Image (cartoon, rainbow, N blue to C red):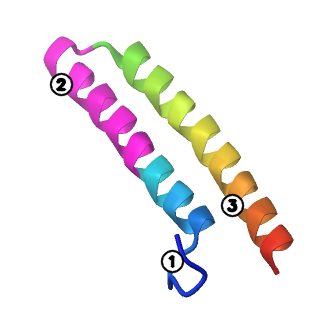
Amino acid sequence: MSDESPVDVATWMLLLSVVVIAFLVGVGLLQLLTTGDVGSFFRNLGIGLFLALFSVGFYRKWHETEV
């Protein structure tokens, strides 16, 4: 990406991780609706939460180093 791009690499990484987290939670909801197993939904939700924490941490760290 060029320096003139309005969206930087950290923002693209955060957007990609939001897509992955939404996919995980969606799969968990689909499993919950089809099988009624609450455990797999909470497992996917927990993984999504950990990914969200790491993504926000990386996003903040990358923006601190770019400024």
Quarter assignment of residue 9: bottom right
* Amino acid residing under circle 2: Leu
Q: Which residues are magenta?
A: 19-36
Q: Main secondary structure of the magenta part?
A: helix
For label 1, the crowd category at 10 Å Cα-Cα, with few meaning under 14, some 14 to 19 and many 20 or more, is: few
Question: Could you say where residue 15 lies in the image, as x and y percent from the top left?
Answer: 46, 59
Mark 3 to mark 1 CA distance (whole Å): 13 Å
User: Would you name the residue on which mark 2 appears?
Assistant: 33
Give the answer, above or below, for where 40 lies relative to 58. Answer: above
Picture quadrant of residue 23: top left
Left or right: 34 in relation to 21: left
Judged from the image, the secondary structure of the residue bearing numbered disc 1 is loop
User: What residue is shown with label 3?
Assistant: 59
Tell me if mark 2 has few (under 14), some (14-19) or many (20+) residues whose alpha carbon lies within 10 angstroms of its own: few
Q: Please give the label number shown on residue 39.
A: none
- Residue 31 in percent (x, y) is at 24, 20
Q: Is residue 58 left or right of residue 31?
A: right
Q: Which residue does the image show at 49% across and 48% down from the upper left?
A: 17
Q: Nearer the viewer, mark 1 or mark 2?
A: 1
The amino acid marked with disc number 3 is Tyr
Q: Which residue is mark 1?
A: 7
Q: Residue at x 31, y 13 (%)?
A: 37
Q: Earlier in the sequence, mark 1 or mark 2?
A: 1
The quarter of the picture where the C terminus appears is: bottom right
Q: Is residue 29 magenta?
A: yes
Q: Is residue 57 part of the magenta span, yes or no? A: no
Task: Tell us which disc is closer to us: 3 or 1.
Answer: 1
